[in-house]
Amino acid sequence: MTGERVLRADAQRNRVRVLDAAESVFAAYGVDVPIEEVARTAGVGVGTIYRHFPNKRDLVDAIVTERMRRLAGQARTRAAQPDSLALFEVADWIVAEATVKKHLGATTSTPASDKPPALQAIAADLRATLTDLLTAEQRSGTIRSDLEPPDLLMTLYGLSAAAEHYGWDETARHRAISLAFEGLRGR
Amino acid sequence: MTGERVLRADAQRNRVRVLDAAESVFAAYGVDVPIEEVARTAGVGVGTIYRHFPNKRDLVDAIVTERMRRLAGQARTRAAQPDSLALFEVADWIVAEATVKKHLGATTSTPASDKPPALQAIAADLRATLTDLLTAEQRSGTIRSDLEPPDLLMTLYGLSAAAEHYGWDETARHRAISLAFEGLRGR
Amino acid sequence: MTGERVLRADAQRNRVRVLDAAESVFAAYGVDVPIEEVARTAGVGVGTIYRHFPNKRDLVDAIVTERMRRLAGQARTRAAQPDSLALFEVADWIVAEATVKKHLGATTSTPASDKPPALQAIAADLRATLTDLLTAEQRSGTIRSDLEPPDLLMTLYGLSAAAEHYGWDETARHRAISLAFEGLRGR
Amino acid sequence: MTGERVLRADAQRNRVRVLDAAESVFAAYGVDVPIEEVARTAGVGVGTIYRHFPNKRDLVDAIVTERMRRLAGQARTRAAQPDSLALFEVADWIVAEATVKKHLGATTSTPASDKPPALQAIAADLRATLTDLLTAEQRSGTIRSDLEPPDLLMTLYGLSAAAEHYGWDETARHRAISLAFEGLRGR
DNA sequence: TATGAATGAGCGTTCATTCAT
DNA sequence: TATGAATGAACGCTCATTCAT
């Protein structure tokens, strides 16, 4: 039993190494990079990757899910103590994450029926948090009351896509988000 | 001479068929679709495609260039008689075009040094037109004077990406653009 | 009838242009060069080439046949007035011809059952002439009497292959042939 | 460690199978034969070939290099105890090897700048050995003193080409080499 | 269990040959 | 009849996935 435990720990460490390697490799060269490259970066054989992730798609989804989980958690925490900056900050985190081939953004903003259930649940959670933040801002009058959650989501999607495309640093990101929020704020 | 004309006409028709097929196939399945699929859709052999376009990349570029040429032309014409709606309309055309894998948007908004010169020139032309329209609006006070052309381009990029992702119809598109422009307009 | 004659003359001219183009193109880039390249060089369409030569192989054979015909003719003429230099001179012509991918040499020296009858006949004629010259030299004692025609042919083949490979000029060619003939001459 | 060894052994066996298959297939049908055919003959998938040899050219070069390495080694050993038969024997080995599309001969006799460094080095070594043998024979007066190494190389090239073309057996080979060497020997 | 060698379907591209003009 | 556009089989090569070790 202890032996099994040790093995599990080993496997777990490998899983993490693969995930880390995949994340950086995909971010750098796109998801079309061969699995072999990920294996090389992770310092494991391809077989090991396939043991943890039945196919390439699953690996990509796992990365997205992980990133999203982190994001959704942070967002929920931040939303627990809402203030006038909360929505902006959460939006900033989301846009900042927009790297790995837009996959994150894409998954954030739609039910995405072809995504694994786990991911869909997390995305739904994030959307719920965003909706909460939106409602709060509308209640305090800082965002136009005629906006719907999808308006916010689509704005975040556009910002994420642009962030990925232009490779925005923090300054550029803040400027862009501010500009977009100006529109949401209304007169 | 007439004989040559006839031949040309035939080849030209095939070129157009290929272009049309490629446009719809790429739009539907992405540019990673096999050339063979494009050929099948066009009702020609792969060799015919390669006769007209030395390689796949050139085919994609040709589509983007064509779309962009149309757009840049329309935009320039519209910009010749500028009024308070001109920028919005041009933006609407651009966002409406956003289909073929975001390539159009991507090319509109950056110098994209790896694109063929013809495309770069057209993109530059479109950017110039947009800058003109922006300046005009700023002069008439309908757009914040502290905005730079890149702010407009990035906004259009984000909108285009979202349009492609959500598959917006005209109504959704207008709403999104209005919202974004609200931000550009300022208080 | 006259009209037909004119047409024939036209066709004949095209045939020659194709043959000339093919000869120089094949010599320069090898027989693997696309037919299209030959057509371009000849200033005709590929269809014209295929009208004269049903397939690529036939075109190559036609060139070889033509070269060989010239060679066999020259050789026969020279052999009509045999002297102590005749064999050397004929050998020199043959080796000098060795360019187009060794095809000439290859065809010169074997029955080559997969070659067109016309070519085989000419090759046989050339071989006969060489045999005559060999016999004459043997009779006058300048070549070892124990040599058989195949010994001569194989020597010429080797020299031709080397000529093609090294791109010998006249000087190098003469030196090599002299050296080889020294061996044939015997003590 | 043992595990690694075993794996290596397996891969090594496949490498050899591929090399053997390629050698015989290329010898039989020429190097233009599809890689697929080599794979079929070796009883492996094409991917396996490409795992061992990045591209077709490398496979061909590997075969040539291997043959040449064997040859250069044998030659050097034989040249260490030179006697009046040494040069003839080495020449015989070289000519006997002349199969795989003349590539071997071609590489033996020229610097061949487009060949891999390893092959060039081995070819240079073989040439050096031949030069040594030539010099020795000249010193003992069995070969004309006015001959240069290139004369010998070109003779071997011609003999190899002929050997490949005619498919000489040992008897024919010996006769041809003797004949050629007669010329090198001089009066 | 981890490894990485093996597999083979699939892709981009070429080019001999055919055929509409 | 000459033209060159169209065809499509075939090739070199890649890479997701499987499997022997």
Image (cartoon, coloured by chain):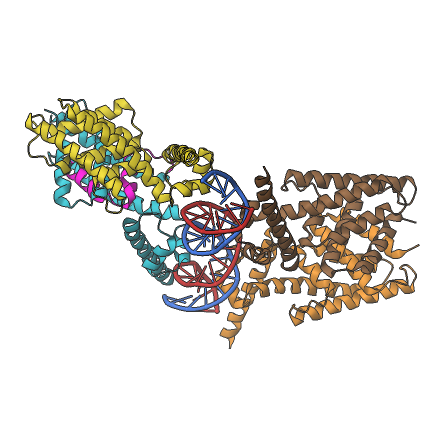
Chain colours: A orange, B brown, C yellow, D cyan, E red, F blue
- In the image, is residue B131 above or below residue A142? above
> Looking at the picture, how far across and down is residue A43, in whole percent?
50, 57
Q: Is residue A143 above or below residue C150?
A: below
Residue D55 is one of the magenta-drawn residues: no
Q: Is residue C130 visible?
A: yes
In which quadrant of the rendered view does residue F9 lie?
bottom left
Q: Give the residue displayed 55% in from the left and 65% down from the top.
A: A55
Front in this rendered view, residue C26 or A95: C26
Q: Which image quadrant: the N terminus of chain B?
A: top right
Asked if residue B25 is positioned above or below residue D92 in the image, the reply reads below
Q: Position of residue A21 (x, y in %)?
A: 57, 57
For the residue pair B22 and A84, the one nearer the viewer reads as: B22
D63 displayed left or right of C178? right
Q: How many marks?
A: 0
Question: To which quarter of the image does residue D178 belong?
Answer: top left
Residue D95 highlighted magenta (yes or no) = yes
Residue B75: image quadrant is top right
Magenta span dominant secondary structure: helix
Going by the picture, which residue comes out furthest to the front?
C1
At 59% from the left edge and 66% from the top edge, which residue is drawn? A58
Answer with left or right where residue D148 lies relative to residue B72: left
Report if residue D9 is visible in the image: no
In the image, the segment drawn in magenta is: D88-114
Image coordinates of residue A141 in percent, x first then y, are: 92, 61
- In this picture, residue C147 sits left or right of residue B141: left
Furthest toward the bottom, the residue is A1
| Residue shown at the point (10%, 33%) measured from the top left | D84
At which x and y percent is residue B121?
70, 38
